[in-house]
Amino acid sequence: MLKTAMFRGGQLCSRVFAVEFDLRTEPLYFTLSSNPQVLHHAHQQLFGDEGKLFSLHVHCDNRTEKARTHAEIKHKLSVTLSRDCDVFEASSFIPDVKNSVVKGFFIRDKSTTTLSEDMLKTLQQSKSVCVFSYKREGQYCWQELWSPVNQVEESVRQYITPAAAAEHHPSTLNIRNSDVFYCMKEAYEVLQECTDIIPESKEVLKLVDEQLETSRGDGFPVIVIEGLDATGKTTLTEALRESLNATLLKSPPQCLAPFRQRFDSEPPLIRRAFYALGNYITAAHIGKESLRAPVIVDRYWHSTAAYAIATAVGGRVENLPKPGSELYQWPEDLLKPNLVLLLTVSPEERLRRLRGRGQDKTVEEAELEINQLFRLKVEEAYKRIQNPACIIVDASPSPQEVLQQVQHLIRNKMSLVTRQDKKPCNPSTHH
Ligand SMILES: Nc1ncnc2c1ncn2[C@@H]1O[C@H](COP(=O)(O)OP(=O)(O)OP(=O)(O)O)[C@@H](O)[C@H]1O
Ligand SMILES: Nc1ccn([C@@H]2O[C@H](COP(=O)(O)O)[C@@H](O)[C@H]2O)c(=O)n1
């Protein structure tokens, strides 16, 4: 079978290619046609006169292998290619068709070296990588299957044809069960598929199996505190534990701490499945603990989904799945909290707090600092999650004032008595 079979057989023409040329603007979209098409001004910038142009796409049936191959190539491209080489995220997709995205990269090599060709030659030997090259001819540009020795399997010339943006940004098409999981089984299966390559997966699955007995009856209230890093979650959750005589839990739970670094270094599919399973373990703890006292949870599903969506979606906030999208719906089988509070502070105040804390920043935190777009997308995704939606809390005042504000909210929303009232009461008896 031809390596490019997935692009052929009538599918190639219906596919749209998207190149994330400039993250602040829309991707450049194009389709392919057998007739020459004059390029638009924007497309001329990408397919302009300078440099050698290639794209490569990763396609294989095994999703964990595909995700890891994509991540490995991304790493190789970033460490190997010269400075005169631009690498853009690129994808091919069928407009508005879920799970149709094939991820890859677009390379514009203005260097005089053969580094990119050497690397592509090696990559092309893998059956899951497909490389195209692009050639210019006056105002036209065409794509063909690339071969280092000009022995292409099928040298069909397809002209670049500018295309309009689809209704749904391509990066939203594959989110379900690749970045965000909506039932435990889906996340569980991802880790099951990785047990050979990531032995820690077995230990994580064992922990999940051991925890899953609990269901939640008419217990005490469960209050989740969410927010970007350094918005004051730890400070507030500790204070709430004290004042409400509550149990404090976190997601991911402590029992997953030894595995976190390992899964953080994996591509999104595997990393997000790990955090999804963490929520189910925390849910089991909530089920037990909420029979005894109110439960405060530091991060839960809102964090898992908001960070995953914001990372998966390229470019601007407008590219996020639209409000009301099914992608913001709470998983059908995950214990729901009674109240979710989202702490927000201005970007300046957040940076002040991050610096004041003087800790090492994780890669994602560092990214947040430099990447205003990403921060905006995480916050917006938090706000779009439904059932339960979060209540926004201005966390810029002093810790004491934020605590009072939140206690007030909890009292109003939950009829929950605080420690000053001596003992916590079960809100279910007040309903
Ligand atoms: N209301 C507040 N006013 C001023 N400083 C605050 C306030 N709340 C927390 N801080 C300070 O901001 C820093 C970050 O707070 P905290 O660790 O509670 O945030 P966080 O949301 O838990 O962060 P992370 O998610 O990264 O763990 C700490 O140095 C803390 O003392
Ligand atoms: N329920 C959760 C909690 C966290 N994450 C991911 O972890 C990162 C933030 O965690 P901190 O310990 O630094 O607060 C963030 O990148 C999330 O991707 C998650 O997915 N689900």
Image (cartoon, rainbow, N blue to C red):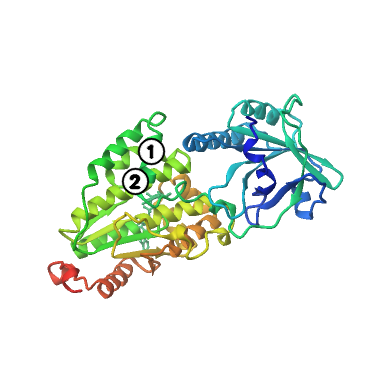
Number of marks in the rendered image = 2
* Crowd rating for badge 1 (residues with CA inside 10 Å; few <14, some 14–19, many 20+): many
The mark found on residue 39 in the picture is: none
Labelled pair 2, 1 in contact (Cβ < 8 Å):
yes
> 247 left or right of 166?
left
The residue under label 1 is: 191
**Percent from the top left, x then y, of residue 123?**
62, 29
- The residue under the point 48% across, 54% down is 309
Numbered label attached to residue 277: 2
188 vs 244, left or right, is right
Residue 24 coordinates in the image, percent (x, y): 63, 56
Q: Nearer the viewer, residue 160 or 84?
A: 160
Ranked by sequence position, the earlier of labels 2 and 1 is 1
Crowding at mark 2 (Cα within 10 Å: few <14, some 14-19, many 20+): many
Task: Kindly tell me whether mark 1's CB lies below 8 Å from ligand 2.
Answer: no
Which residue of the protein is positioned furthest toward the left in this rendering?
A: 422
Q: Secondary structure at mark 2?
A: helix
Residue 390 placement: quadrant:
bottom left
Circle 1 — which element? helix
Quadrant including the C terminus: bottom left
Q: Quadrant of the N terminus?
A: top right
- In this view, the residue in front, 211 or 317, is 211
Position of residue 5 measured from the top left corner of the image (x, y, whole percent): 64, 36
Please state which of residues 111 and 331 is positioned toward the viewer in this rendering: 331
Q: Is mark 2 within 8 Å of ligand 2?
A: no
Residue reaching furthest to the front:
9
- Left or right: 246 with respect to 9? left
Give me the C-alpha separation between circle 2 and circle 1: 9 Å
Q: Is 237 located above or below residue 201 in the figure?
A: below
- Residue 162: give x, y in percent of width and height: 74, 52
Q: Amino acid at mark 1?
A: Leu
| Amino acid type at image mark 2 | Leu
